[in-house]
Image (cartoon, rainbow, N blue to C red):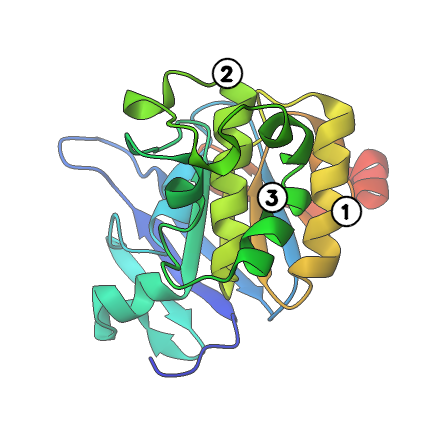
Amino acid sequence: LEYCSGQVIFDHVSLRYPNSERDAVHNFNLTVNPGDSVALVGFSGSGKTSLVNMIPRFWNPTSGRILIDGYDTRDITLKSLRKQIAIVSQDVILFDDTIRNNIAYGVPNASEEQINKAIDDAALREFIDALPKGLETPVGEAGNFLSGGQKQRLCIARAILKAPKVLILDDSTSAVDTATEARIRQCFSTSLKDTTKIIIAQRIGSVEEADRILVLDEGRLIGQGTHEQLMEEC
């Protein structure tokens, strides 16, 4: 996949985990155009994470297909596919290294200017400037020297620096206060305006500005629209 615009299509997609008696995702259809922001909401177990985990092929659909720019993801090499995607989840992944190297993990040749912009966009500037070693501060094993919100913002900075064509945010700001989260969302709309964003969140404020909000229940799509439309109709 040499060029990717970020279009994602779910075509009659179902997913059933081994030894399960029901689909985690059932006959799901969706087209997300490049640069769109789509949010997934629903109770725990409604299929939100199962759905997004099929995009980078952590799981393959039991039936149906997922297309990236018209290509079935199963026909794209994993390296090429995942190069276009960045994921920030509630359970962050950090390495026992410096803040700088954790942010630049996906872009090892990033310039100082690019790293600093990602830091600002992820609302990390004040925190990092207060550290005696700044960007060279070790984060500890699994980031255990950092708070939950700092870990999440560090992973957000890493994703912003990568400038992916598809960004998946799975409850990625659950440990961040609402004011800081609003600052980060604003930066998404400018720094990543051409990136396709798929967002899972528990707080309604995290998703109400999305172009479309999809409501899932037991792996099925039961409603979609803007925040205002859903408040009236769903």
In the rendered image, is residue 176 in sight?
yes
Looking at the image, tell me whether mark 1 or mark 3 is earlier in sequence order: 3
Q: Label 1 sits on what residue type?
A: Gln
User: Which quarter of the rendering shows the N terminus?
Assistant: bottom left
Q: Mark 1 highlights which residue?
A: 186
Label 1 neighbour load within 10 Å: few <14, some 14-19, many 20+? few
Label 1 and label 3: CA atoms lie apart by: 14 Å
Categorize mark 3 by other alpha carbons within 10 Å: few (<14), some (14-19), many (20+): many
Q: Secondary structure at mark 3?
A: helix
* Position in image of residue 187 (x %, y %): 72, 50
- What label sits on residue 93 in the rendered view? none
The residue to which callout 2 is attached is: 147
Judge whether residue 219 can be spotted in this image. no
Helix, strand, or loop for circle 1?
helix
Answer with the quarter of the image where residue 230 lies: top right
- Say which quarter of the image contains residue 214: top right
Q: Pick whichever of labels 1 and 2 is earlier in the sequence.
A: 2
> Where is mark 3, residue-wise?
119
